[in-house]
């Protein structure tokens, strides 16, 4: 996993993969399991983020049972299918393979390679594939033959940011388990009805309750909780997070918030390593994202 930062609070998670090769029954079974494992990892560790997956899948849409369609079921778009196949869609399973010439001469974008570039958008960032090309002609030897047994495919992307979902950069360490409230926020502009912060020496947990009744809770069970119930026209407009070292790891020690009405709430212990974010115009804090376990390791804000 490479988490690419495009701008403040703008991230795309990039995965490279290489699945089991071969066309025997056991190979196809293993390849299905490989793809399922990658998708499961992505869903757990990139929830809420835009994602690009690329690499040698060793799979063809035309080969029966090859498992490549699992990506479409998980919300991914294949750039080749989108931009080259178009309305025809992915080749039918069991149909003739659209192989590229063995000698690499006369390769076009129409042939299907086992190397794929797939992507899906997130609630805060929309990815759009704008160009797909098999760059074979740029990677030939002096005799005019390919330099590799794999074809070099490329895809260009554009992206746009949501006007109703924005992220801060996160701050903190690498411990804990990934979470993102982006996946839990309802469509439109949800109202935050209350927030609870619990801490002592460090921030132990935080909890946000939406007008839908959903509670978004992250961290452990310790500390002394303190809560703030928001008025219907009140938004959290400022978020401060302080971090420090605990048992050799960086963790969140302190969180403080301020509302549009000037009220505040805080928990934990302040440190000199601090960052404060202010909500974009018209938005308020409606969730958080980062990593947590028995405490909070990494934390960023979700404005909506």
Image: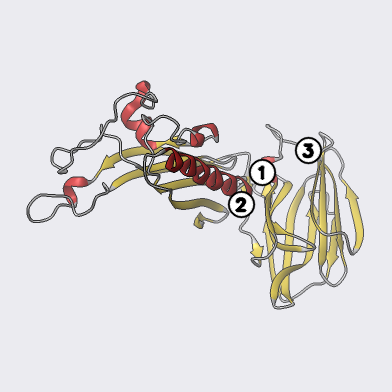
Mark 2 vs mark 3: which is more N-terminal?
Answer: 2
How far separated are the C-alphas under marks 2 and 3? 27 Å
Question: How busy is the neighbourhood of tag 3: few (under 14 within 10 Å), some, or many (20 plus)?
Answer: many
**View extreme (left): residue:** 143
- Which mark is drawn over residue 272? none
* In front of the other: 258 or 270: 270
User: Can the viewer see residue 68 in this picture?
Assistant: yes
Question: How busy is the neighbourhood of tag 2: few (under 14 within 10 Å), some, or many (20 plus)?
Answer: some
Mark 2 vs mark 1: which is more N-terminal?
Answer: 2
Element at label 1: helix
The residue at the point 45 percent across, 42 percent down is 26
Q: Is residue 179 above or below residue 118?
A: below
Element at label 2: helix
Q: Position of residue 48 (x, y in %)?
A: 61, 45
Please state which of the two labelled residues, at mark 2 or mark 1, is closer to the viewer. Answer: 2
Q: Position of residue 251 (x, y in %)?
A: 72, 69
How far separated are the C-alphas under marks 2 and 1? 13 Å
- Residues at circles 2 and 1 in contact by the CB criterion of under 8 Å: no
Mark 3 vs mark 1: which is more N-terminal?
Answer: 1
- Which mark is drawn over residue 191? 3
Question: How busy is the neighbourhood of tag 1: few (under 14 within 10 Å), some, or many (20 plus)?
Answer: many
Q: Position of residue 124 (x, y in %)?
A: 58, 43
The residue at the point 56 percent across, 41 percent down is 122
Q: Position of residue 254 (x, y in %)?
A: 79, 67
**View extreme (front): residue:** 25
Say which quadrant the C terminus sits in: top right
* In front of the other: 27 or 133: 27
- Which mark is drawn over residue 182? 1
Q: Disc 2 marks which residue?
A: 45
How far separated are the C-alphas under marks 3 and 1? 14 Å
Instruction: Choose top left, top right, bottom left or bottom right for residue 173.
Output: bottom right
Element at label 3: loop
């Amino acid at each position: 996993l490479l988490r690419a930062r495009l701008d403040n609070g703008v991230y795309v998670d990039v995965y490279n993969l290489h699945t089991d090769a071969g066309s025997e029954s056991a190979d196809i079974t293993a390849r299905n399991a490989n793809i399922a494992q990658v998708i499961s990892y992505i869903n757990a560790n990139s929830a809420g983020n835009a994602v690009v997956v690329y690499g040698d899948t060793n799979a063809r849409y035309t080969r029966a049972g090859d498992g490549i369609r699992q990506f479409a079921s998980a919300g991914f778009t294949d750039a080749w299918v989108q931009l080259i196949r178009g309305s025809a869609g992915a080749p039918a399973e069991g149909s003739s393979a659209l192989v590229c010439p063995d000698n690499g001469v006369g390769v076009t974008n129409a042939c299907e390679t086992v190397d794929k570039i797939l992507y899906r958008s997130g609630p805060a960032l929309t990815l759009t594939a704008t160009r797909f090309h098999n760059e074979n002609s740029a990677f030939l030897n002096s005799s005019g033959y390919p330099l590799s047994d794999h074809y070099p495919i490329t895809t260009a992307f554009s992206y746009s940011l949501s006007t109703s979902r924005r992220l801060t950069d996160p701050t903190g360490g690498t411990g804990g388990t990934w979470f993102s409230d982006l996946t839990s926020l309802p469509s439109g502009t949800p109202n935050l009805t209350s927030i609870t912060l619990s801490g002592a020496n460090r921030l132990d947990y935080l909890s946000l309750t939406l007008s839908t009744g959903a509670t978004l809770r992250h961290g452990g069970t310790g500390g002394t909780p303190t809560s703030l119930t928001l008025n219907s026209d009140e938004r959290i407009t400022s978020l401060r997070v302080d971090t420090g070292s605990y048992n050799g790891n960086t963790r969140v020690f302190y969180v403080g918030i301020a509302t549009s009405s000037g009220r505040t709430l805080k928990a934990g212990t302040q440190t000199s390593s601090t960052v404060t974010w202010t909500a974009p115009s018209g938005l308020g804090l409606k969730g958080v994202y980062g990593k947590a376990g028995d405490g909070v390791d990494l934390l960023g804000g979700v404005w909506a």
